[in-house]
Image: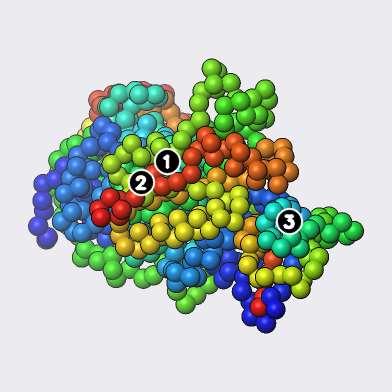
Amino acid sequence: MKLLFGRPAGLTDINQRYCPGCGHGIVHRLIGELLVEMNIREKTIGVAPVGCSVFADEYFNCDMIQVPHGRAPAVATGIKRTRPDCMVFTYQGDGDLAAIGTAEMIHVAARNENITIIFINNAIYGMTGGQLAPTTLPGMRSTTSVKGRDVVTQGYPIKVCELLNALDGPYYLERVAVDIPRNIIKTKKAIKTAFQYQLDNKGFSLIEILSMCPTGWGVTPVQAKKWIAEVMANYYPLGELRNRAKEAK
Amino acid sequence: MPEVKILEEVCKGCGLCCDNVCPVGILRLAPDRINSSGYHPAEITDMSKCIGCGYCYMTCPEPAIEVYK
Amino acid sequence: MAEKELMYGNHALVEGVIHAGCRFFAGYPITPQNESPEYMSIRMNEVGGVFLQTESEIAAINMLFGAAAAGARAMTSSSSPGISLMQEGLSYIAGADVPVLVVNIARGGPGLGNIAPAQSDYFQAVKSGGHGDYHTIVLAPNSVQEMFEFPRLAFELAEKYRNPALILADGLLGQMMEPVEIKGEPIDPKTLPEQDWWLTGCKGREKRVIRSYDLRPGKLEEWNWRRWEKYQKILKNEQRYEDIKIDDADILIVAYGTSARVAEAGLRIARQKGLKVGLLRPITLWPFPSDILSELSKRIEDILVVEMSLGQMIEDVKLVVEGRSKIHFIGHPGGGLPNAQEIYNKILEIRSKK
């Protein structure tokens, strides 16, 4: 019997500590597969900041660095400018990227820094226990918005891809999801495209991935999966927002 | 013939692979047993129907599923 | 005798950094050190290095973290409020045992303060300015020559111990001109040997991880004790100081950086009047030169500490002296400078009470 599908060599053998049904594991696996399929595992340096993604340094089977909350784009810039031949990606959650790391996110995109940001949008702070995130939907409950996000006092969510799309810098921006197999396939394709653009020295890419956080949302994994399609993807529409390669044609 | 192997000790029983993912509907959470972490692992009800598409593997966050052919 | 060149302190610093083989600079504009990054932007371009003007000091220190983790000699330059913003990153860098160089051209504080020279960042520099148990190696130049020389020393110490290093100066040292002798051959960064912790892509080897956390029970404590052992080695081996006329002194001045220059002028007046005054100038503020000060305090009754602050280094002096000597103080916080006459007057006052 030949193994068709199984844990890729781009992941370590360590079993992940994420909660049952967490989307992180799916995205980890896609990156792990691409590290092997694109033959880049031995030239990749990953940057894991703070949040649930703090554990990513143990799970990816490539050189990794764990860095301060929100600062991964700056650290990745330092690495890439020092080792331009390496493939450098950051793996960041929504609190990390779109709250505390907003400045670093915007400026790395404006510089069109030749790195890739993998952005996990699960609309909540997972690691710290389900608090309101910059991406929490209006009316959505969290442990710091127990009656639902009140936009009058707590403001509106940040749509990261749309925000960055206002800049001239970014080369490639796409929003995808990991709820169902069709979207998971698209997610892998988007990450692969971003990695390839980096290898081709095209510049900055960000892939925003709508991802389940059943624990933070207080629902079952299956309910979480359905909520992405029924609610979350309406607020955060899936699709390619920027692709300079296509504009050039 | 394709074959799906569930790594029962790795499975966290999230059920994502069991919900409208398998085209031939042969996955479910084992109703009668739990693993050492206390989860009902996924199981295959009729391996002979498996078409080896890998969708179950694709939706598994761990991954606790291997597909052979 | 090698040829000397007249240089600004801030420019000498840049030449020293380039001479030391550093090819990575990231920083954010702040007075009174802007001449450094401006000149650095030109020099890095000339030598094929990286110059990044960042969105904040927070980004700058984290770019250093990444660059140094990938094997670069990396440095930033800033001034007091900017150094405050870097403390989070410095804590992570210290916790991950990564060598970087940070230069603080300090100014008056707290808050926005002013842009006059000050020494009120001493506590922040030597007592782990960010969170957690850690130390930064701190060098305090007092001349333009040392502004040129200390970057190389700082990188060597930082790399020897895998520890961040800091040069603590002020705007006076940055903006004055003095002749500088270019000593030694410049370092070609390509000749620096690859280290077994650099992130380079895991070709032909196991993956490497650089991090500052360990959630396993008891493991962080073990790790921190190992770092404590490193600190003990630094404390034992790397104390540096300059002493002037200490052999027959019965009054000792302790001062560093700009204060030490003024103190030396005060000493000269006192010596002309026949007073036996010596000066101990700490060059490393951490490790503090405890051994020599401890010895001197066994025979010198009076120690005068001169600082451009409300009194920060004086606490370390007291810790070392352990009550053996009387400690006197001249302080100028908020950007004020001491002067030689003031120091001489204080010495007379101390003398009259003997």
Instruction: Residue at 51%, 30% (x, y): give it.
Output: A157
Crowd around label 1: few <14 · some 14–19 · many ≥20 (10 Å)? many
Q: Work out whether disc 3 and disc 2 sit on a shared chain.
A: no
Q: Which mark is residue B18?
A: 3
Give the Cα distance between marks 1 and 3: 32 Å
Crowd around label 2: few <14 · some 14–19 · many ≥20 (10 Å)? some
Disc 1, SS: helix
Q: Position of residue C177 (x, y in %)?
A: 14, 40
Q: Position of residue C281 (x, y in %)?
A: 34, 43
Which residue position holds label 1?
Answer: A161
Q: Earlier in the sequence, mark 2 or mark 1?
A: 1
Chain bearing tag 2 is A
Left or right of C176, for residue C336: right
Give the Cα distance between marks 3 and 2: 35 Å
The quarter of the image holding the C terminus of chain A is bottom left
Does residue A207 appear in this view? yes
Q: Look at the picture and state if C304 lies above or below C91.
A: above
Q: Position of residue A41 (x, y in %)?
A: 47, 68
Q: Amino acid at mark 3?
A: Cys
Q: Nearer the viewer, residue A14 or B25?
A: B25
Chain bearing tag 1 is A
Q: Nearer the viewer, residue B51 or C285?
A: B51
For the view shown, which residue lies furthest in the right direction? B32
Q: Amino acid at mark 1?
A: Cys
Which residue position holds label 2?
Answer: A242
- Pointer 2 and pointer 1: residues touching (CB < 8 Å)? yes
Q: Amino acid at mark 2?
A: Arg
